[in-house]
Image (cartoon, rainbow, N blue to C red):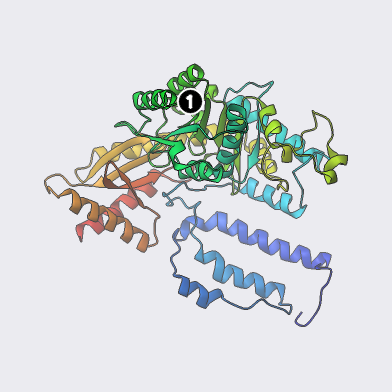
Amino acid sequence: MKNVINATLSLSKEEMREYGYQIIDHIVAHFDTQEEKNPVAMASRKDMEALLMEEVPLEATNAQAVLNDVMEKIMPNSTIVSHPKSYSFVPGPSNYISTMADTLATGFNIFSGGWAASPAAAELEIITIGWLVEMFGFPTEKGGGLFTSGGSMANLTALVTARRVKCGDDFSKAVIYLSDQAHSSNIKAIRVLGFKKEQIRIIPTDIEFKMAVNKLKNAIAKDRLEGLHPFCIIASAGTTNTGTVDPLDTIADICKTEDMWMHVDGAYGGAAILGTHGKELLKGIEKADSLTVDPHKWFYQPYEMGCLIVKNHKWLSETFTEKPEYLRDVEGNESEINFYDHGIQLTRRFRALKFYMSVKTFGLNSFKAAVQYNLELAEKVEGILRKSAKWEVISPATLAVINFRYNPIGKNFSEKKLDALNQEISKQVIGSVEALLVTTVLQGQVVLRMCLINPRTTLQHVQETLDCCEKIAATL
């Protein structure tokens, strides 16, 4: 194939079939054997450049050789976030049906921005967004939304909309409120929107890591007395650190009284509404004006798939619609939604397909069972930790997140020593490449954090990891 110019960038039918079968075989093998692999990939920039760096290839390379290189050099050097022992950050459990759906969407190269380009893709997004609107108790007649690349883009889209609805063109005196446990993507979105540091209020959290309501009320009152314009509260429905849910009902009442926009960042925890206890914890989420949910987290979808839903879909179209001349022939009517008019992206991939195909294939009851399993697994892990003389629970199991630290009874370590000890446990666990277990900081303490949203993670996986931690601690 070398020195051959292929100006059409095409393969024969037989070549495509053979190549495609090989890739599918690789993916199937990955799903089938990932538990047998080490979840952690560790390499320095120097290591990776030595392995992968090259000048842009001007001449053709055999397709099989390129695929072999990818499978031998790239895939093994990527952390397996769907591994049962990948506990850190927010794992991406994924599922095979959605993976194949993404392959279909990419293979057919479907443009999912406007109705005229693909009526079926647009309709499927309307349908699946409608499923989510109903799940979260938003108004089924007026509610709507769109799929985004992730929670960061969903939060940004929500805040652009909130600013237009509540502030119009002048937001010089606008003030926005969020807790010290809110996800960093919200701060990033606020900065992108041009708000100054003085317009952001970081509200402290209470001992349970929930937004302190009295401090929130005091901050709003003070800002009003100073002639400012409180316009939005960002509440968390499942913080990344602890899985904590802010008092949504109370915050909704404040927003109603103060005529403020209520945005709920449920990127992580929103899917817990499928679980019995999760639904109880998320009470009040249906009162939000806008809600971020990430299907590529706890709805078990592959990356990238975030979602924003709103009480009134017209808020989105009134915020984002533009009418360039080159789109004048594809505007359609009001019922034929052009999703490029509902968000920031014009060119959009067909994200709805994977959500549709996986829910249709497995059934929502299977997703509910998986979420419920995750919630119960975290509670069982908490029970194990509390019965041990070696572990201390710092933040109890909440929406499948638990924080704990090694603090054996009778040792009387200083706080500084305990911080160093738990940091070293994490470092050595990761260094073993047998589990991904990192630390966070809560109430000034370095703690180990587990996020247990993988439905294929078992109690045995967790126990093996705790045993590994204890062996490491014994050597320190």
Q: Tally the numbered discs.
A: 1
- Identity of the amino acid at label 1? Lys
Locate the N terminus by quadrant: bottom right
Give the residue at x 56% y 58%.
Answer: 30
Residue 236 visible (yes or no): no
Q: Secondary structure at mark 1?
A: helix
Give the residue at x 27% y 39%.
Answer: 393
> Residue 473: which quarter of the image?
bottom left
Q: Position of residue 370 (x, y in %)?
A: 51, 37
Against 31, residue 1 (above or below) is below
Q: Position of residue 37 (x, y in %)?
A: 47, 60
Give the residue at x 58% y 35%.
Answer: 158
Residue 119 visible (yes or no): yes
Q: 325 or 79, which is in the foreground? A: 325
Q: Position of residue 369 (x, y in %)?
A: 51, 33
Q: 475 or 167, which is in the foreground? A: 167
Residue assigned mark 1? 279
In this rendering, position of residue 332 left or right of residue 66: right
Locate the C terminus by quadrant: bottom left
Instruction: Name the residue furthest front.
Output: 227
Q: Position of residue 99 (x, y in %)?
A: 64, 50
Give the residue at x 45% y 20%.
Answer: 254
Q: 193 or 360, which is in the foreground? A: 193
Against 101, residue 181 (above or below) is above
> Residue 120: which quarter of the image?
top right
Instruction: Name the residue furthest bottom.
Output: 3
- How crowded pointer 1 is (Cα within 10 Å; few <14, some 14-19, many 20+) is rated as some
